[in-house]
Amino acid sequence: MRTLKFAVLGLLNRRPMTGYEIGKEFDYELGQFWNAKHSQIYPELKKLLDEGLVVFDIEISGDILEKKRYTITEKGQLELLKWLHKDEPVEKTPKDIFRLRMYFSNNLDLESRIHLLESQLIQHKKRLSILNKTMEQYQGGVPPHDTDRFGDFIVLESAILREEYVIKWIDKCMGYCKAALEKEQGKAK
Amino acid sequence: MRTLKFAVLGLLNRRPMTGYEIGKEFDYELGQFWNAKHSQIYPELKKLLDEGLVVFDIEISGDILEKKRYTITEKGQLELLKWLHKDEPVEKTPKDIFRLRMYFSNNLDLESRIHLLESQLIQHKKRLSILNKTMEQYQGGVPPHDTDRFGDFIVLESAILREEYVIKWIDKCMGYCKAALEKEQGKAK
DNA sequence: ATTAAACATGTCAATATTTATATGTTTAAC
DNA sequence: GTTAAACATATAAATATTGACATGTTTAAT
């Protein structure tokens, strides 16, 4: 349903941007829940332009480099608002390769499983610590509800809670595997 | 990286199945983290057949209906095992339309936001209650680590924890919006 | 001056996924 | 006997996404 369309419109509604800058946005807070490569962004911008939802100005950077700075049109804002108001049913849960792997993990010996879980745990803890670091800038509390910062803040919070849940789950799995391993080793004695 | 290939191999490694039955599997525990439509499954089975990773027998059901029951080959099992052992880096977090919407939610009035959050909350609570119901069958504790049930159990647990985190997040967002609304109404008085 | 990293824009091919179209059989309920 | 739901297989078209190819400029460091 062309979600990228609305991701781009939403970003341009914050401020005019070039395609490159839109791509950069996916490196920050929003990137935790949406992203696209430049090979998808540029064609999407072209489409939005054709539909009259955005316009662009050429900006010269340095001597000759032409940057296209896109601005959302009134029509674009209207479509964005309409989309934002939509009360759509919860999506089906997203695909997750690691869980798929764990679903079949009974085929792995316990040591391999523990190794895989450990590796994921380290990475998620690292990710969480980065997210927590990012959260430090919000010492002043929740940003005003009518500013862009509000959106930044709540998705960051979601990302943090998400990592916490994943870590909790991995810990549990690790507990099951370690308990089984000890039981096996006890029997072996 | 053809993840569906391994999802199918993993399922066929549990027991021989028809394409239709593979599709059904995505309705249960596994469906929380992987799924595919039959229009993707049948071509995938054909590919696996060409690659010698599965074989099939024709089974007659009723008078004439031919069912193709696929079985994983030794080669298929080897590939599956190799894939299961792979220690791959954590994926980038999956896309989520509702969070994208909330990211731009500063453009919505507080009432609309609360309405959208409320709608999501109800749906997630319902989903959680279904998952908890499913969990009831595991009264006997964690299934043995070398059985299929183990996989069923841990992904179900992950799904439950996930819903709990989402609900926690939505509650927080709702709290922010309601607080802001009260503050606004206080000012209006 | 040189160089590397970041900035900047685009297309193309391949892969993945969804939606629609197509065609039937079997089973269980009425 | 009829009917509806579930079972069963498959292809085609459209959409979404990724990875590779292609080309160049600007900025900051050395």
Image (cartoon, coloured by chain):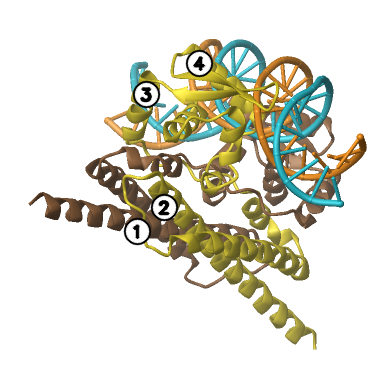
Chain colours: A yellow, B brown, C orange, D cyan
Residue C8, position as x, y percentages in the image: 65, 28
Disc 2 target residue: A154
Q: Residues within 10 Å of mark 4 (few under 14, many from 20)?
A: some
> Would you say the residues marked 1 and 2 are in contact, meaning their CB atoms lie under 8 Å apart?
yes
Disc 3 target residue: A79
Which of the marked residues, 2 or 3, is nearer the chain's N terminus?
A: 3
Disc 4 target residue: A49
Q: Residue at x 30, y 43 (%)?
A: B116
Q: Give the quarter of the image for residue C23.
A: top right
Which of the marked residues, 4 or 2, is nearer the chain's N terminus?
A: 4
Seen in the picture, residue A3 relative to B28 is either above or below; the reply is: above
| Left or right, residue B125 beside residue A105 | left
Seen in the picture, residue D17 relative to A166 is either above or below; the reply is: above
Say which quadrant the C terminus of chain A sits in: bottom right
Give the label on residue B99, or none: none
How far apart are labels 1 and 2 at the CA level?
A: 9 Å
